[in-house]
Image (cartoon, rainbow, N blue to C red):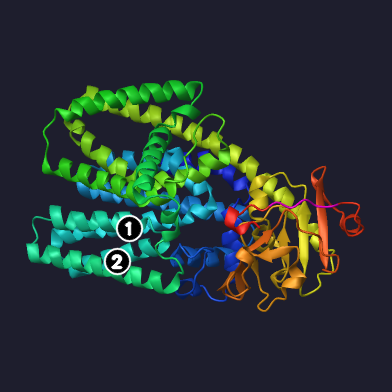
Amino acid sequence: MATLAVVIAFRAAFGGYFMLDDFGMMSIARFLESPLQPFYQQHVPGGVFYRPVGMLLWWLSERLFGTTASLHYMLNLGLHLCVAAALYSVILKLAENRWLALLAAIAFASHPIGLGTAAWLSDRFDLLSLLFGLLGLRCALDFSDTASSRSLAACTVLLGLSLLSKEIGLALVLTTAGYVLVFSRDLRLALRWRAVAVLLLLLAGYWFARSMVLSSPTGGALMTLNSPLQLLSDGVSHWAAGWIQYSSYWQQMHGWRAFATASGLALLAFLVIVALFQPWTRRRVLMIALGMSVVAATALLQWPLLGFITIPFADDAKVIERVVNSRYFYTTLAGFLIAMAGVLEPLGQRGRVVVGMSSLMFSLLVLAWLGASQHLLRQYRNETLLQRDLVQSANAHIRTFQLKQPGCQIYLLDVKNWAFTWVSDEAIKATYPELDAIGRCLIQTEHTPWYHITSVDDPDPGFWLPLQFAHGHTFKHSSSAIGRGYFVGLNLMSDSKINIGTPAYYLAWQNDNFVDVSDEVRAGRRVPRFLCNRSADECH
């Protein structure tokens, strides 16, 4: 019943399309010659992210589903429900209370943080990382009971997969190591230290692989933009403010959902107060410490990035922002529910009145969260469909062009949708049926996209004017290989002049469709105005 309710709340997403980094992941997957390449080759521009297991799944899903977005959404929802099942298993092992574990898993599966994270396809990395991390933690719980080498080996492998899915897996590795060392009191101290040494060896191996593959494994460039202490202060405060807003979701609750949320939170506060005066068993302390360790670790791991950005959640915040930013709290939500299960654990034996109040509190909150999630996903679906209209119209026109090689350029003018301008090159290369035909072309709006991805391996810069290499570097210094293609950092300068000699095409967005204006641009009757969207030192 819970699964059915979650599927119903999520169903609007099945009619949606791709958004932002979704295009980037799909285009990268298409350029990969082998799904194993991300393990030994940089696979995301910038040289900061090492997520080969996540990219392996993107490679498989792109080959299996192509551009059928509904199947990609089904995969993400399936992974999210698997994470909820893994959370159920962990809490059941800790609390030995089936209903408490079930209620926590349903709360996780229903919350807008969970369904919002599942809705952005690019957040598949978070889903995978938390799934493997919770399964690894579950094996560590078995190890603490049995001292089984098999459980320790399974724990190590699963936590390794979590790390290779996304960096947030570090939170589960650190939490697991702390649990084994501090709370596995039935094991000999030497055995506990041996298990921790295995996990530390895992971290060393992960760091070595990351350092060998990535050009910037520490992301140290962030530290040059502000002092580390200032970044830490700002990052943690931004994270904490966002967590308060996203966990309650109060600002997006209206009508009956606001009443249900307020009533549910009031009951929860009362039940927490009652629970604080119940006996503090070792089990309760363990669950709270374990859950809050996950919460603290996820907050600290994300401070270098969140030191530069706030996490908007006001009524006027874009639906894209609310969905995309949910990922910052996905692992946090799981940790918080483990801790909350520990707080409320003794209430199951306090009689019918307390149990009835707990059931009412849970029902009110879950119904409100499911309603808010459904509303969020409907809005998000509508935003993604704007991307579909742009992509499909552009592809239809591009199929009529004689794409000359090399030097092929396609400009998509007058597009006011910022999400598309940011990923215009990847959007077309992720969806155009014949990658070989479009792979050597450069595609952009009047704005510089995040990056271009091209199969040109020895370009003549003159063919690409008015596009120029970032920082004025050569192709070698402005690109990195990815499968049978290259990530290329190119800029469109505000004073750039159209090179009439290049085989470029120009499409303008008019009346919800692209119109070919190539002849007007070449004749000088229309002059595109370019903007550089990169940092100041890259815009000359």
- Indicate which disc residue 355 carries: none
Quadrant of the image occupied by residue 218: bottom left
- Indicate which disc residue 203 carries: 2
Q: Name the outermost residue toward the bottom.
A: 458
- The residue wearing badge 1 is 170
- Give neighbour class at mark 2: few <14, some 14-19, many 20+ (Cα, 10 Å): some
Q: Which circle's residue, 2 or 1, is located before the other in the chain?
A: 1
Q: Where is residue 194 drawn, in percent x and y?
A: 15, 68
From the viewer's perspective, is residue 399 above or below residue 100? Answer: below
- What amino acid is labelled 2 in the image? Leu
Asked whether residue 437 is in view, the answer is no
Which of 361 and 117 lies nearest the eye of the viewer? 117
Quarter of the image containing the N terminus? top left
Q: Is residue 161 left or right of residue 490?
A: left
Indicate yes or no whether the magenta region holds residue 141.
no
Which stretch did the figure color magenta? 527-531
Q: Is residue 350 left or right of residue 302?
A: left
Mark 1 residue element: helix
Which of 266 and 94 lies nearest the eye of the viewer? 266
Q: Where is residue 39 drawn, in percent x and y?
A: 45, 72
Q: Where is residue 88 drawn, in percent x and y?
A: 31, 47
Residue at 39%, 35% (x, y): give it: 241
Give the CA distance from mark 2 to mark 1.
8 Å
Q: Are marks 2 and 1 in contact (CB under 8 Å)?
A: yes
Mark 2 residue element: helix
- Magenta stretch, overall SS: loop
- Give neighbour class at mark 1: few <14, some 14-19, many 20+ (Cα, 10 Å): many
Indicate yes or no whether the magenta region holds residue 529.
yes
Residue at 62%, 64% (x, y): give it: 470
